[in-house]
Image (spheres, rainbow, N blue to C red):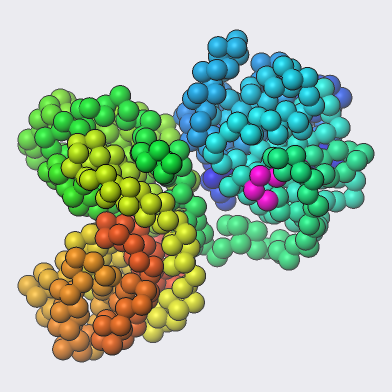
């Protein structure tokens, strides 16, 4: 996600901010900006592109200021461009604000502010926040810290923010909820950042801001923390143990591992503002205008490539079960070169992490030309696919840098689940009780993913046993068949071990011939509709001396007795099992690849975004 860095002290802020933004580059971003404050002079520079582009843009211009804020943006609301880059300003021009997160209720707040005469320049949710603070400061006649507190009391969503004010250059205000923010305390100087990487070279003393806390950093009075209810909090100063060398990739050895570990948060971000348990509804703002067409669809066509195609397969099961609409999932590359039958009452869902995959783009154009309505599920905001589709829902997974897709898959499945639930409810094909039960189960998934991630040591142990295998088989059934395909893809992509995913029962029609004592067979055997059948398939593998590594539901005993290893995952509803069961398979592949000395983040011959057919 985006990166935040800020400084208040005696030194010139600009070099510290630029250096800090470079340290945060590993997070991924598409634009960058800084605001510098000296006396009552507030200067803002921002542009699309890299930190080096920002430096060239600033080159030769004034960078004076002992207070400053810097930001790298990864677009969520509005395409990556100069105007949408942070910092943002309110109507008065006194404030500059940087933000990491998503403001869920930005639309009604914006409407109210427009009504009050505010003029917006960008498409971002962030700009709403700075206008709101600006408005409150004036209408209530309060200082910056109080205006921030009052504004945040009206905001639903996730944020880490830092704000500075031309009228009060001695003060910097920071706040957080669900997005991390660290404050560094040096000798007569303070730093704020999304993580400790830009801070550690300046000071080891840090305070991790808690959810709902607002920090007021005053040049003379120092650091004071209050919460949103205006209660005073005592800052807990910790000493950083992080070494400078460990800063890249936020402390993880590889982007892929970092992205696997981000999934609890990224799934939550995919649902943010969309799943409303209180009201018992799913709202997908991006497809709202097309809802009725979706509800009346005679058929859904899902298009994608690679991992996105696997997510589409999970989508097939979801839409057919919840909404009772027939679904076909197609490789975009095959679809575009057939003479496919596309009807005007078909809905086409195009799935793409990058939003740039050439085959998916061409397939969309073909379907569009035949009159279908196209809905995009993309991760990269403003990407080509996001632009050519009629409507869509972003996955909000944050930038994915490892070539092997991990958090994008779970985010795509999350969005597909939300869509299928919403359409099922509106079509009346999903009973109210079932709909509500599934909403609750979905809401609990991020915490359950976290529990799965805690099994990493055990998964690493299993990886060590099978790291020298030449072949591997992955089996699943129903909702977990696409997970078996995805597990096999992850292993072959990054470890170069030949792996195949199969529907468990189909094994008998070929792959069973390959099974011997050297063959690891990964089976997703969670409790659910196909459990007993999968147990029989496990027995068939055992009879041929294959090694079974089973993903099972917590507390399972039957498979435990049969398998060589079991990895337990928390219980959930059948349709949500893919979101949990894929995680141990990602981790197994990662650790096997590392043990084999492979370049995990950039596997040979593969590209992150395939923009040629
Ligand atoms: C490439 C990537 C895969 C990805 C596929 C589709 O092959 O290496 O990780 O799943 O393209 O990409 P998309 O960006 O359209 O999801």
Nearest the camera: 60 or 416?
416
Q: Residue at x 56, y 63 (%)?
A: 252
- Count of marks, rendered view: 0
Q: Is residue 390 above or below residue 513?
A: above
Nearest the camera: 248 or 183?
183
Please state the horizontal and vertical placement of residue 357, each as a whole percent of the image.
31, 41
Magenta span contains residue 214: yes
Left or right: residue 61 compared with residue 423: right
Q: Is residue 546 above or below residue 209?
A: below
Nearest the camera: 316 or 606?
316
Q: Residue at x 30, y 24 (%)?
A: 289
Please state the horizontal and vertical placement of residue 282, each as a whole percent of the image.
35, 39
Residue 399 visible: yes
Left or right: residue 171 compared with residue 25: right
Residue 13 visible: no
Residue range of the region highlighted in magenta in the rendering? 210-215
Determine the residue located farthest toward the right in the rendered image: 220
Left or right: residue 566 compared with residue 153: left
Nearest the camera: 60 or 521?
521
């Amino acid at each position: 996600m985006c990166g935040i860095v800020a400084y208040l002290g005696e030194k010139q802020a600009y070099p510290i901010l630029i250096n800090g933004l470079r340290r945060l580059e590993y997070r991924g971003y598409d634009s960058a900006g800084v605001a510098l404050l000296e006396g009552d002079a507030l200067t803002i520079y921002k542009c699309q592109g890299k930190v080096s582009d920002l430096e060239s843009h600033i080159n030769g211009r004034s960078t004076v200021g002992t207070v400053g804020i810097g930001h790298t943006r990864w677009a969520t609301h509005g395409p990556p461009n100069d105007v949408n880059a942070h910092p943002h300003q309110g109507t008065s021009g006194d404030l500059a604000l940087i933000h990491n997160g998503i403001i869920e209720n930005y639309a009604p707040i914006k409407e109210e502010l427009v009504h009050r005469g505010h003029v917006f320049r960008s498409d971002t949710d962030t700009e709403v926040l700075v206008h709101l603070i600006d408005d409150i400061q004036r209408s209530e006649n309060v200082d910056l810290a109080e205006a921030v507190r009052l504004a945040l009391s009206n905001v639903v969503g996730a944020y880490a923010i830092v704000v500075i004010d031309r009228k009060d250059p001695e003060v910097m205000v920071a706040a957080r909820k669900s997005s991390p923010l660290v404050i560094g305390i040096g000798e007569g100087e303070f730093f704020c950042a999304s993580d400790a990487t830009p801070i550690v070279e300046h000071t080891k003393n840090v305070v991790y801001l808690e959810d709902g806390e607002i920090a007021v950093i005053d040049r003379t009075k120092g650091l004071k923390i209050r919460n949103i209810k205006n209660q005073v909090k005592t800052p807990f100063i910790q000493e950083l143990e992080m070494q400078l060398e460990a800063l890249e990739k936020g402390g993880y050895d590889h982007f892929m591992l970092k992205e696997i570990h981000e999934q609890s948060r990224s799934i939550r971000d995919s649902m943010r503002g969309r799943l409303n348990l209180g009201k018992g509804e799913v709202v997908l703002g991006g497809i709202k205008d097309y809802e009725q067409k979706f509800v009346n669809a005679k058929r859904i066509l899902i298009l994608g490539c690679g991992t996105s195609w696997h997510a589409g397969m999970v989508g097939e099961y979801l839409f057919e079960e919840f909404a009772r609409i027939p679904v076909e999932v197609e490789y975009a590359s095959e679809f575009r070169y057939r003479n496919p039958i596309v009807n005007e009452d078909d809905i086409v869902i195009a799935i793409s992490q990058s939003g740039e995959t050439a085959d998916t783009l061409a397939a969309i154009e073909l379907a569009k030309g035949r009159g279908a309505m196209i809905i995009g599920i993309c991760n990269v905001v403003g990407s080509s696919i996001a632009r050519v589709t009629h409507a869509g829902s972003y996955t909000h997974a944050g930038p994915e840098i490892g070539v092997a897709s991990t958090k994008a898959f779970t985010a795509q499945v999350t969005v597909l689940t939300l869509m299928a639930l919403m359409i099922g409810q509106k079509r009346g094909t999903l009973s109210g009780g079932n709909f509500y039960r599934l909403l609750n189960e979905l809401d609990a998934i991020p915490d359950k993913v976290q529990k799965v991630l805690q099994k990493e040591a055990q998964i690493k142990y299993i990886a060590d046993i099978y790291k020298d295998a030449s072949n591997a088989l992955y089996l699943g059934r129903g909702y977990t068949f696409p997970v078996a395909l995805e597990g096999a893809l992850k292993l072959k992509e990054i470890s170069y071990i030949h792996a195949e995913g199969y529907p468990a029962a189909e094994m008998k029609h070929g792959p069973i011939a390959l099974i011997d004592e050297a063959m690891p067979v990964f089976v997703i055997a969670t409790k659910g509709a196909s459990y007993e059948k999968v147990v029989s398939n496990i027995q068939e593998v055992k009879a041929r001396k294959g090694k079974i590594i089973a993903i099972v539901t917590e507390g399972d005993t039957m498979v435990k007795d049969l398998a060589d290893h079991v990895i337990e995952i928390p219980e959930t509803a059948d349709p949500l099992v893919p979101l949990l069961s894929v995680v141990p398979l990602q981790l197994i592949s990662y650790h096997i690849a590392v043990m084999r000395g492979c370049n995990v983040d950039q596997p040979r011959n593969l590209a992150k975004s395939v923009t040629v057919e």
